[in-house]
Image (cartoon, helix red, strand yellow):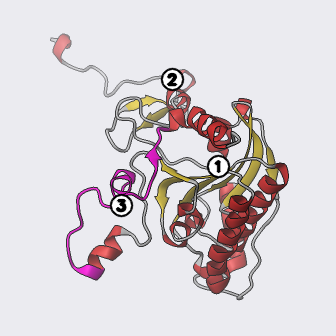
Amino acid sequence: MSWFRRTEKGISTPTELKRETPDGLWYQCPECKNVVQTREHQQNAYTCPKCNYHDKIGSEAYFNLLFDEGKYTELDKDMISGDPLNFVDTKAYPARIKATVEKTGLKDACRTAYGKINGVDFTISCMDFGFIGGSMGSVVGEKIARGIDHALKKKTPFLMISKSGGARMMEAGFSLMQMAKTSAKLALLEEAKIPYISLLTDPTTGGVTASFAMLGDLNIAEPGSLIGFAGPRVIKETIGKDLPKGFQTAEFVLEHGFLDFIVDRKELKDKLSSVVTIMMQPS
């Protein structure tokens, strides 16, 4: 009866024959739970092949997706936050910045670069949610302002990719001042007739939404992005009522007239180059 009886406990495999699955080989969609190879997910512009869920990505991924052959020149890449208020919560602000830099490899929550998109010169500022929740501090505002200055000098269209939890509390008033600063710089782009396209991604909230994110000549968004000033939980607790279905999604915001259109990330590069070419034609 050895057919039905295990003669040895467990199945033993020599250590030298064991193979471990490499980390990051597979990606599971948080929306539909579909599992695909990480390489396939990346080749699909970090969107799910089954349900088209747009995964959160950072500046490096956007730059590689948008710039021709992934080639670009970064501006002000070594700029880093100071500590104007000597702020301390569970740790001192400089210590928090240092720890976040070591963890993410980023210097702050925004990077600016220039290059070509389908042969069209572009300047792009892109926020990184992984750096203290994509919070807007002095460095973020200064990098965006200098990016706009570069677009003005080189007469290139300016693309702002927003992904933020709002203003950075560790810089208080200095952070809020970036709203006015960036908005004033964008007015110079308008005077120079240089296109400004604002791309809102998941999430775009707080002072970012209340300033440069909603000031584009074209305001566009990725599918399913959370867009708003205060978060839905805060609003629900404030008004004491249930919110409409899909409240503050890109689709809801588009329906209510605050966006020009929603663009799939896989089509973003071609869409940007084509609309800017039209916008820059002499009238």
Residue stretch rendered in magenta on the structure: 238-264
Residue underneath mark 2: 14
Residue underneath mark 3: 248
Label annotation for residue 59 = 1
The amino acid sitting under disc 2 is Pro
Residue 230 image offset from top left, x and y in percent: 41, 73
Q: CA distance from mark 1 to mark 3?
A: 23 Å
Residue 214 image offset from top left, x and y in percent: 53, 62
Taking the spot 36% from the left edge, 61% from the top edge, the residue there is 248
Majority secondary structure of the magenta segment? loop
Q: Is residue 152 toward the left or the right of residue 126 in the image?
A: right
Query: Is tag 1's residue or tag 3's residue first in the polypeptide sequence?
Result: 1
Taking the spot 39% from the left edge, 53% from the top edge, the residue there is 250
Query: Is tag 2's residue or tag 3's residue first in the polypeptide sequence?
Result: 2
Q: Residue furthest front?
A: 283
The amino acid sitting under disc 3 is Gln
Where does the N terminus fall, quadrant-wise? top left
Taking the spot 71% from the left edge, 41% from the top edge, the residue there is 282
Q: Secondary structure at mark 2?
A: loop
Q: Secondary structure at mark 1?
A: helix
Neighbor class of circle 1 (other Cα within 10 Å; few <14, some 14-19, many 20+) is many
Residue 47 image offset from top left, x and y in percent: 46, 36
The amino acid sitting under disc 1 is Ser
Displayed quadrant of residue 73: top right
Q: 34 or 220: which is nearer to us?
A: 220
